[in-house]
C-alpha cells in the first residue's frame, strides 16, 4: 500500500468505511484465489487502486471484471509468475508506471513460530518472511515506508489441494474441521485494518488465529 498524502483518516464506523483507502495503491499477489482474491475485493471496496497479480489469467480477468463496476479507482491486471525474476521486474515497472509506488505488506503464517511435523520447509520459509520483513522495516522505516507481516493461523484456502503426500492431504482438512477456521475474508479484513491506521503508526507483526487455536 502507498499514499501520496501524509496520513490516513481514522475508520470511525463499525465494519469498513467505503473510501478510507482512496488514493492508496495495493499490489496483491496470488490474487487469483483465496486470501489474495479476498484482499483485492476488500481493498478495492475501501477505495484503493488495486493491481491483481497471479498466473491464472482467466481468474484474474474474472476478478477484474467483478471489481471494475464497484469502484472508481483503477484495477490493473498483471498476469505474472513470481518464480520468474524477470517477470517480477517487469510487473513492478508496469505497476509503478501505471499506479505509483506501494509499501510492503507480507502475509506469512504462524508456522513461522510453531512446530508442525512434516512441514519443516514451510515453517522455515515463513520464518524467513518474518525476519525479512523485520529487516526491511529497519532499512525502510527511516524513509517513511511501513513494512508489515500478517501471520494467519488455520485458514480455509486452496493450500494443500495439490499435495502429493496422502497423509498430508488428510491431516490439513482435519486441522480445519477440528475447530472453526478463519476465512480468507477474515485475513483480508485484518490487512485492511493494518494499512488504514495513521501513517505514523505501524502494526508491524499481526498474528491472527481462530480463537480455538489459542
Image (cartoon, rainbow, N blue to C red):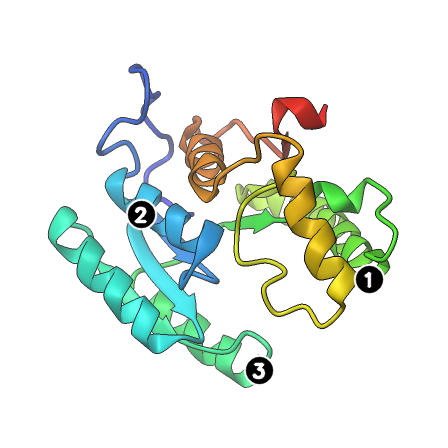
Q: Write down the residue under mark 3.
A: 84
Mark 2 Cα shell of 10 Å, populated few (<14), some (14-19), many (≥20): many
Is residue 121 placed above or below 112 in the rendered structure?
below
Q: Position of residue 190 (x, y in %)?
A: 48, 33
Q: Quick check: 37 left or right of 125? A: left
Nearest to the observer: residue 23 or residue 44 = 44
Q: Which residue was labeled with disc 2?
A: 41
Quarter of the rendering occupied by the C terminus: top right
Answer whether labels 1 and 3 touch (C-beta < 8 Å): no
Of callouts 2 and 3, which one flags the residue occurring earlier in the amino acid sequence?
2
Q: Using the rendered image of the protein, determine whether residue 47 is visible from the camera's viewpoint.
A: no
Mark whose residue sits in front, 1 or 3: 1
Q: Is residue 174 in sight in this rendering?
A: yes
Q: Quadrant of residue 14?
A: top left
Q: Residue 135: where, in percent of width, then height?
A: 73, 49
Q: Position of residue 83 (x, y in %)?
A: 60, 78
Examine the rendered structure and indicate whether residue 199 appears above or below residue 111: above
Q: Residue shown at 59%/48% (left/top)?
A: 107
Which residue is drawn at the image coordinates 58% and 50% (left, top)? 106
Residue 121 bears which disc, if any?
A: 1
Does 4 sit above or below residue 36?
Answer: above
Q: Above or below — where is 157 with respect to 52? A: above
Say whether disc 2 or disc 1 marks the residue closer to the N-terminus. 2
Tell whether 133 sits left or right of 16: right
Name the residue nearer the viewer: 69 or 139: 69
Number of on-image labels: 3
Residue 115 as seen in the image, left or right of residue 98: right
Q: Secondary structure at mark 3?
A: loop
Structural distance between the alpha carbons of marks 1 and 3: 20 Å
Amino acid at each position: 500500500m502507498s499514499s501520496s498524502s501524509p496520513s490516513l483518516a481514522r475508520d470511525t464506523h463499525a465494519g469498513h468505511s467505503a473510501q478510507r483507502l482512496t488514493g492508496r495503491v495495493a499490489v496483491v499477489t496470488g490474487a487469483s484465489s483465496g486470501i489474495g482474491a479476498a484482499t483485492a475485493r476488500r481493498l478495492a471496496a475501501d477505495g484503493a487502486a488495486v493491481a491483481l497479480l497471479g498466473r491464472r489469467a482467466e481468474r484474474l480477468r474474472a476478478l477484474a471484471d467483478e471489481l471494475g463496476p464497484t469502484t472508481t479507482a483503477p484495477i490493473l491486471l498483471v498476469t505474472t509468475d513470481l518464480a520468474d525474476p524477470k517477470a517480477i521486474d517487469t510487473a513492478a515497472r508496469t505497476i509503478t508506471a501505471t499506479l505509483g509506488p506501494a509499501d510492503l505488506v507480507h502475509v506469512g503464517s504462524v508456522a513461522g513460530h510453531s512446530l508442525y511435523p512434516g512441514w519443516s520447509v514451510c515453517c522455515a520459509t515463513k520464518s524467513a518472511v518474518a525476519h525479512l520483513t523485520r529487516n526491511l522495516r529497519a532499512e525502510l522505516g527511516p524513509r517513511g515506508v511501513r513494512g508489515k507481516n500478517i501471520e494467519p493461523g488455520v485458514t480455509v484456502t486452496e493450500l494443500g489441494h495439490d499435495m502429493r503426500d496422502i497423509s498430508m492431504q488428510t491431516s490439513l482438512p482435519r486441522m480445519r474441521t477440528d475447530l472453526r477456521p478463519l476465512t480468507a475474508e477474515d485475513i483480508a479484513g485484518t490487512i485492511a485494518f493494518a494499512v488504514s491506521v495513521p501513517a505514523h503508526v505501524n502494526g508491524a507483526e499481526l498474528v491472527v488465529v481462530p480463537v480455538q487455536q489459542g
